[in-house]
Image: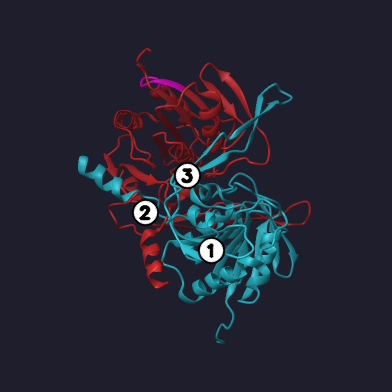
Chain colours: A red, B cyan
Amino acid sequence: MTAKVRPTILITNDDGYQAQGIQFLASIMRELGDIVVVAPDSARSGAGCSITPTCPVSIQRIDETTYACSGTPVDCVKIALEKILPCKPDLVVSGINHGDNASISLHYSGTVGAVLEACMKGVPAIGYSLRTHKKECDFAPYAEVVIEWAKRVLHDGLPEDTCLNINFPEVKKLAGAKICRMARGMWHTEWLDAGTDEDGKNIYTLTGTFNNLEPDADDTDYWAIDHDMAAITPLKLDMTDYLTLERMSGER
Amino acid sequence: MTAKVRPTILITNDDGYQAQGIQFLASIMRELGDIVVVAPDSARSGAGCSITPTCPVSIQRIDETTYACSGTPVDCVKIALEKILPCKPDLVVSGINHGDNASISLHYSGTVGAVLEACMKGVPAIGYSLRTHKKECDFAPYAEVVIEWAKRVLHDGLPEDTCLNINFPEVKKLAGAKICRMARGMWHTEWLDAGTDEDGKNIYTLTGTFNNLEPDADDTDYWAIDHDMAAITPLKLDMTDYLTLERMSGER
């Protein structure tokens, strides 16, 4: 047996394999290990943890280390682990997403969905997102934090059933990085009237405005991003509300 | 001003407005309040918390209280609250899903996604799912628990940012109902080779086998269902792993 010298790193996203964010992430990860990119064949914004149970999913090899998948980000991770990678990877990284996935927005995020899926399979995983919606942006200011946390997780691992959600502000230079919790937030005014379709049905286009419900709390991801810092948030798979569980159990 | 006599209940699901489970749920909820059904126009299994940001979503009125939506279960809740209901509902119920959404499977669930969305909007919400994949099944054994918890939540509300995930076993008579946590679990062997498509790409069909990683733990949703009981699990929106956050903050 030969010792494994370089770690295997699986890279995915929800913006599609051609997005600038994943190409930047791949270029960085190449320094740290042997990479394989398995990402959607086109953008899958808002995919959350969705999967494709109702139709077959296709895989197309694009180049030596890149595969395009017709499914969701979660499908990409599932199919990479079972059908593409020669061994279980040492790390899954997802992103860098064009758009932040802080506060409750992470529930809708395919970038985070892929990270949760890797976590469910026992692989340490990190999602990276940038508060921008530009297709072309400068990811260089985030390289140092991206590498630092990838190295750290490769070295130390993460607790069982825990993964990382990292969000960046759009800045020329980060003011630091902060370990923080999810802010409480709410989306509102989410639908634009778009008239009627050819069948006369009312149609609407999804948009929305986000309100941070605790703008003064300095321990949240939103606060960190608002203050030009990277927000590092550990997430857990177990969504059980233990406080409520205890209270409800006592009442019965 | 007249006092509000009957509560308003929004009903949705991920199997589509014509599914047997939602029709049973609607028939029960009619006893408790004024109902409005806003559900996908066809099955959206595995939709999780996904949304439809890239194309317009249509709404079709089917009858006086039923609307079919071209979007995901989360879209249904968003559009019902903003564009269809005359007032904020007192309760959102989702299901009854054909298939359980216990353990980690809840992350993939559109039924649970709709419940989380209602919770994000500050509306008490309950998801109901049945461990079956039959299209036609007898939901009568679950009516009592469905009603009990809907009444309880209508009366007492739920803590902020908390919602309920209720799963049923397929039985003639429930052995009880148990307040419990999410079991740790893992899906494996998830892809069937389905040959190649017309472009020569490899295609795979999603399937899979679920392993309960703690079959002996009697405080989990899986254990309850395995023992013929309804599993009542409070979920919270905040996925922050506070233990890890504390440890990581200490290390810096």
- Amino acid type for the residue under numbered disc 2: Ala
Identify the secondary structure beneath mark 2.
loop
Q: Residue furthest top?
A: A2
On the image, the x and y values in percent for residue A115 come to: 45, 38
**Dominant SS in magenta:** loop
| Residue situated in front as seen by the camera: B210 or B246 | B210
Q: Which residue is mark 3?
A: B185
Asked if labels 2 and 1 touch by Cβ distance under 8 angstroms, the answer is no
The mark lying in front, picked from 1 and 2, is 1
Q: Nearer the viewer, residue A56 or A185?
A: A56
Disc 2 target residue: A183
**Residue drawn 35% across and 44% down?**
A234
Same chain for marks 3 and 1? yes
Q: Nearer the viewer, mark 2 or mark 3?
A: 3
Q: From where the camera sits, is residue B79 visible?
A: no
Q: Are marks 1 and 2 on the same chain?
A: no
Between residue B121 and residue A88, name the one nearer to us.
A88
Question: Could you give the CA–CA distance between mark 1 and mark 2, rounded to whole angstroms?
Answer: 23 Å
Residue B148, located in which quarter of the rendered image? bottom right
Which amino acid, by three-letter code, is at mark 1? Ile
Q: Which residue is mark 1?
A: B126
First to last magenta residue range:
A30-35
Disc 2/disc 3 C-alpha distance (Å): 28 Å
Mark 2 Cα shell of 10 Å, populated few (<14), some (14-19), many (≥20): many
The residue closer to the viewer here, A108 or B20, is B20
The relative height of residue B19 versus residue A177 in the rendered view (above or below) is below
Q: Chain of mark 3?
A: B
Q: Chain of mark 1?
A: B
